[in-house]
Image: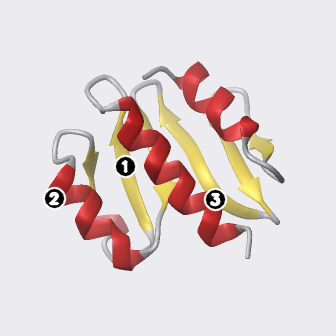
Amino acid sequence: MTPVEVARYAESLPLVKRKGTSTRPAWYVHDRLVVRLDDPNTVVIRVPLSRRESLLETYPDSFGVPPSMEAHHKVEAYLDRADPSAVRAAIDLAWEMQRR
C-alpha cells in the first residue's frame, strides 16, 4: 500500500478531513486523529485498545506498537509490507472510534 492509497481511502470515509503538512499529512474526524503518515513507509492509526492485540496477532508483519505508543490507542502500519486490507480495516476501526 502506498501513502497515496492511504490518503484516497481515508478521504473516502464520511466526515474525514485532511490536516497536517505536505510531508506529514493526517486525517481526522471531528478533530480526532484517524491516521497520520509518519514517513513514506509508516502510518500511525488510532485504534481501540480492545482491538489492537487482535490486529497485531492477525497481521504481525503489517502492524507494530513501539514503546512510546504502548499506552495509547495507536498502531504503526508498515506500508512496504502491510496487507492493504489490514490497513483499511485498521483505518475503519479508527474512523468508527472517532466519529462517535
Which amino acid type is marked by label 2? Glu
Q: Which residue lies under the disc numbered 1? A: 76
Name the spot of residue 59 as percent of width and height, x first: 21, 47
In the rendered view of the protein, which quadrant contains the C terminus? bottom right
Secondary structure under the numbered disc 2 in the rendered image? helix
Mark 2–mark 3 Cα distance, whole angstroms, equals 21 Å
The tag on residue 58 is: none
Using a 10 Å C-alpha cutoff, classify the residue at mark 1 as few (fewer than 14 neighbours), some (14 to 19) or many (20 or more). Answer: many
Which amino acid type is marked by label 1? Glu
Q: Which residue lies under the disc numbered 3? A: 95
Horizontal relation, residue 52 to residue 94: left or right: left
Name the spot of residue 62 as percent of width and height, x first: 26, 40
Using a 10 Å C-alpha cutoff, classify the residue at mark 2 as few (fewer than 14 neighbours), some (14 to 19) or many (20 or more). Answer: few
Mark 1–mark 2 Cα distance, whole angstroms, equals 14 Å
Q: Tell me which corner region of the image, top left, top right, bottom left or bottom right, holds residue 33.
A: bottom right
First along the sequence among labels 1 and 2: 2
Q: Nearer the viewer, residue 19 or 51?
A: 51
Mark 3–mark 1 Cα distance, whole angstroms, equals 16 Å
In the rendered view of the protein, which quadrant contains the N terminus? top left
Contact, mark 2 vs mark 3 (Cβ under 8 Å):
no
First along the sequence among labels 2 and 3: 2
x 40%, y 36%: residue = 85
- Above or below residue 52? Residue 6 is above
Secondary structure under the numbered disc 3 in the rendered image? helix
Horizontal relation, residue 81 to residue 21: left or right: left
Residue 66 shows in this picture: no
Query: Nearer the viewer's eye, disc 1 or disc 2?
Result: 2
Q: Which residue lies under the disc numbered 2? A: 57
Horizontal relation, residue 53 to residue 10: left or right: left
Which amino acid type is marked by label 3? Trp
